[in-house]
Amino acid sequence: MANRKVEEKDIGYVDAERKKVVYPFLKKEFALKPEEEIRLLMIKKLILEYGYSPGQINVEMAVKAGQVTMPKKADIIVFDNVRNHDPASQAYIIVEVKKKDRKDGIDQMQTYCNNTTAEYGVWFNGKDIVYQHRKREPHQFQDIPDIPRKGESLEDVGVFYKDDLVPATELKSVFETIHNHIYANEGLLKEKVFNEMLKIIFIKMVDEKSIEEKSEFRITEKELREVEEGKGQSFVDRITDLFDRVKQEYGDVFAQNDIINLNPITLAFVVSQLQKYDLRDTPADVKGTAFQTFVYAHQRGDRGEFFTPHPILELMVEMLDVGDAEMLLDPASGSGGFLVYAMNYVWTKFRRRKGVKDVDLVKYAHNYIRGIDFNPDLAKVGKMHMVLYDDGHTGIFSANSLEEWDRLKAQAIASGVREIEPEKYDLILTNPPFGSKGKVTDKRILAQYDLAYKWKFNKTSSEWGKTKKLQKGQVPDILFINRCLQFLRKGGRMGIVLPNSDLNNLSLEYVRQYIKQNARILAVVSLPVGTFASAGANPQPSVLFLQKLGEEDAKKLNEEGYPIFMAAIAKIGYDLNTKTATVLYKKDERGELLKDENGKPIIDTDIPLVVEAFRAYRKRHGLRFRKTEEF
């Protein structure tokens, strides 16, 4: 059973400032290295997912081969009990994490097991994993789907009831392990691997949502033996039946003739990696990190797509205070981060009210949330992301948001999506592709946008004026500013991530004038360099918040002048100097972690302060987003 009573913070954490990995329950710390982070991850899984108590676990323990102490210590040992940590007589599970090479790692793990009482061994390098059972015959090991949880036997592995499923401690390495295994064993191209993973995750989610008490998405040790012997048809049929249900329920994602293109042994491995998890109950940040990393790794394009980190989703959704009766659109929705965060933000408001049912939450998502993405695979991922949170996926479709209105509306209708038309939306949250690479050059598309024309400065009026001559090409981020304002109703508001060059380059003054002529600038929040570094990109970004106005209202407001909220975020909540996006926590003068009222460590970020300051600013200036809004 899962060990839900143990807090993650009490198991271990990365102290990025001191470059240490700290294990409070062991009262030990080690230098921050990749293998140490892998060990921390595995220890958290053993405690939080498999239910072993911290007192059963130890690290860096010497193992003897006969009378001789082995030169290297065992990375992790799980013991039969909390009292006796003698590897020779009480070891139950041994985990090797320091050997990156598969053969070396498995050999090392087996050597430890052969010289202790350990029945089970695990080799895990963060990207690949092997579970083995030591048989009674000397030096004989057998691959198994997973190790038993506390209090269970090998026969119990894969026999899951829905109540047995546990939230995932993390999913990033799980997804990566699955991908690597498919890639290594199936000979599929990257895009094909991606599509097979999508199928599997949808199958898992459909099984979780079924009313059956017993999980169908599972594989036992006995079934794995049958698969290895070429007799595993009952297992394959069970998963295939689940996929038939997926195609029936999600016909907008999968075609009826789609099949699972994995051989049975690969399918068995993939199912074994996911079967114990309750994905719907897994924390939003865990799922968000996994999706962002997984999608970026397999769907990164050359158009400058940078996936939006979770802290920026929080900043933009909470500053614009998404309402439950407001039409919301992300015209560059990617993996659906804004849509999911906004949906959960509104659902939190719903749940504070009496009498609100789950059906009301799903109705909100279906009726008020829309997303468009140019990449059809990303649109599928966005749908998957929404489904993981109990739906709303039908509002997402694949199209070029910059297309002519007639074509865009036709594509939306063909996908079963309504409300894709000008001046329809109350809210837009988006992080469009940006950068000079990949300018839009299609004159048919450019002709729709004021910002695609050349502008000329009038010295007499000291203003820029649009000419009748189209530019040869325009970067998509500037066109998205234009398109987003077209999508918005008067009074509607938007938050858009932009490169700082759009806001301060002298040559783009006409863009800023256009914005002021059509909207009130609510706020500009500068983000630190490196905000998108974990996605492999490092532009200097800011978030621009606008409220659309009519031309006369904008003119009057500009003549009178008005205040603009400005903020610069220095701390975003994770280490910007690493690609692993290590979370940073606040500490007191003695270096001890600061904790909130629930005993959880406080993330070291400026974002809550900026959100609160903006709310105070709105109250001070009477900036109501909704007529019924009370400050």
Image: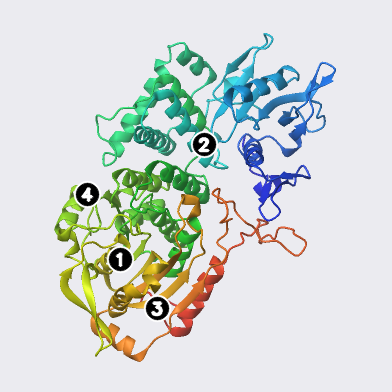
Measured in 3D between alpha carbons, the distance from the residue under mark 4 to the one under mark 3, in whole angstroms, is: 34 Å
At a point 53% along the width and 25% down the height, the residue shown is 159
Q: Which mark is residue 112?
A: none
Query: Which numbered disc flags the more N-terminal residue, 1 or 2?
Result: 2
Can residue 36 be seen in this snapshot? yes
Query: Which numbered disc flags the more N-terminal residue, 2 or 4?
Result: 2
Residue 553 appears left or right of 307: left
* Residue carrying label 1: 478
Q: Position of residue 41 (x, y in %)?
A: 62, 40
Query: Which numbered disc flags the more N-terminal residue, 3 or 1?
Result: 1
Neighbours of disc 4 within 10 Å: few (<14), some (14-19), many (20+): few
Asked if 606 appears above or below 518 in the picture, the reply is above
Q: For the residue marked with disc 1, what is the amino acid?
A: Ile
Q: Give the structural element (helix, strand or loop) at label 1.
A: helix
Residue 212 quadrant: top left
Q: For the residue marked with disc 4, what is the amino acid?
A: Gly
Measured in 3D between alpha carbons, the distance from the residue under mark 2 to the one under mark 4, in whole angstroms, is: 33 Å
* Residue carrying label 4: 416
Residue 463 appears left or right of 356: left
Q: Which mark is residue 174?
A: 2
Q: For the residue marked with disc 2, what is the amino acid?
A: Val
Neighbours of disc 1 within 10 Å: few (<14), some (14-19), many (20+): many
Q: Are marks 1 and 2 in contact (CB under 8 Å)?
A: no
User: Nearer the observer, disc 2 or disc 3?
Assistant: 2
* Residue carrying label 3: 624
Q: For the residue marked with disc 3, what is the amino acid?
A: Arg
Depth order, front residue of 407/581: 581
Query: Which numbered disc flags the more N-terminal residue, 4 or 1?
Result: 4
